[in-house]
């Protein structure tokens, strides 16, 4: 009886901490042309309300809009915009969130116990109950504009708190700017995106260099977290093995000791899961930067040779991503047709 209980508890530990747990994110509404690119895939599918969404999936709104629910957040994805679904972590709480890749996303966050997170190619934001916009230009420059409540915008260069009626702009390799007033009534960021995009022309190589520097800084953070993750994971595995050996002994004292080891292993596995979630979110942020580099390359004049610059950005991303790929981070798409109800129409690769 005791032995079965220990084995069951160990199995429970293994199940709850595997990376790539199915996200609760889902579509609430879809209008016009909305597509989903599953994590690890290159093709897009027409979005469907029945379609499940997982970490790493990307949603593209061409001339349409979509409303997505993830955790305690609800996001309206505007036309000509792209987001990526990601996991979220707040202390020991886990949940879902998004990374805004380009365009505009309006977020409404309710109070609750689930974690929720928001990011862009240049920064992340901590949020309580609030409403705000994430507006991302082609080069990843992001404006965080708060309609109600407050958010904390940060990266490794600095942090600011942005309150109601204020916005902060964050460049590719710079800290968040001091919050400034913005017109909450007009709430139209099209002209701002256009003004930022105009400044890209002629500056593509230096922008790519900033993107590479941003990824390299993120990689340093990933490397530090990776060492912590491996240490905690190895300790958890050791505790699990010791628990199994004690359970096999079968004596009353051994079973009691096995229970303690199993409990310790559970705590360590959960700690490792939290660390992995933090790393994976940074990895997805890095990928969004690569996509920004590819976007400015597509929009550049034919005479502007950017391939080597973009390749350098992609290589910086791959230096850490190969570690995640080896652990199945790109395999969430394998069950896309079998385990998730996908849109029936597959579309060609979108340059977006």
Image: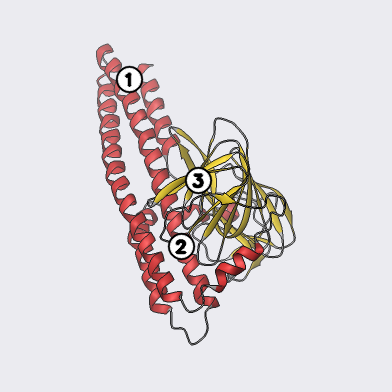
Local crowd at mark 1 within 10 Å, few (<14), some, or many (≥20)?
A: many
Name the residue beneath numbered marker 2: 289
Mark 1 or 2, closer to the camera: 2
Residue drawn at x 36%, y 23% is 6
Identify the residue under disc 3. 125
On screen, residue 292 above or below 97: below
Q: Residue furthest top?
A: 252
The nearer-to-camera label among 1 and 3 is 3
Q: Work out whether residue 89 can be spotted.
A: yes
- Residue drawn at point x = 32 percent, y = 45 percent: 225
Q: Position of residue 264 (x, y in %)?
A: 32, 26
Q: Nearer the viewer, residue 7 or 141?
A: 141
Q: Secondary structure at mark 3?
A: strand
Numbered tag placed on residue 259 in the rendering: 1
Viewed as shown, does residue 53 lie left or right of 251? right
The mark that comes first in sequence, 1 or 3, is 3
Can residue 22 be seen in this snapshot?
no
Q: Residue at x 63, y 46 (%)?
A: 165
Q: Secondary structure at mark 2?
A: helix
């Amino acid at each position: 009886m005791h032995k079965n209980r220990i084995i069951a508890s160990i199995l429970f530990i293994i199940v709850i901490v595997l990376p790539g747990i199915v996200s609760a994110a889902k579509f609430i509404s879809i209008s016009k042309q909305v597509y989903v690119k599953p994590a690890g895939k290159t093709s897009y599918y027409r979005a469907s309300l029945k379609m499940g969404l997982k970490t790493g999936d990307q949603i593209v709104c061409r001339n349409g809009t979509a409303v997505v629910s993830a955790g305690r957040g609800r996001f309206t994805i505007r036309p000509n915009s792209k987001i990526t679904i990601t996991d979220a972590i707040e202390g020991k709480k886990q949940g879902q969130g998004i990374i805004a890749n380009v365009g505009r996303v309006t977020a409404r966050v309710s109070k609750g116990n689930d974690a929720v997170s928001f990011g862009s190619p240049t920064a992340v934001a901590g949020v309580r109950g609030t409403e705000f916009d994430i507006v991302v230009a082609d080069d990843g420059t992001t404006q965080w504009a708060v309609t109600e409540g407050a958010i904390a915008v940060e990266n490794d260069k600095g942090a600011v708190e942005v309150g109601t009626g204020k916005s902060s702009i964050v460049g590719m390799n710079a800290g968040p700017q001091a919050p400034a007033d913005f017109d909450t009534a007009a709430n139209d960021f099209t002209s701002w995106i256009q003004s930022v995009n105009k400044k890209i022309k002629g500056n593509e190589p230096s922008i790519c260099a900033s993107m590479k520097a941003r990824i390299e800084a993120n990689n340093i953070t990933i490397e530090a977290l990776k060492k912590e993750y491996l240490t905690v994971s190895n300790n958890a595995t050791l505790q699990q093995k010791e628990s199994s050996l004690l359970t096999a002994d079968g004596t009353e004292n051994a079973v009691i000791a096995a229970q303690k080891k199993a409990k310790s292993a559970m705590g360590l596995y959960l700690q490792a899961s939290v660390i992995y979630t933090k790393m994976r979110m940074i990895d997805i942020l890095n990928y969004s930067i690569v996509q920004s580099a590819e976007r400015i390359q597509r929009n550049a004049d034919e005479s502007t040779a950017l391939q080597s610059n973009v390749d350098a950005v992609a290589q910086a991303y791959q230096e850490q991503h190969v570690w995640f790929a080896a652990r199945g981070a790109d395999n969430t798409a394998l069950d896309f047709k079998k385990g998730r109800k996908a849109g029936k129409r597959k579309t060609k690769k979108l340059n977006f």
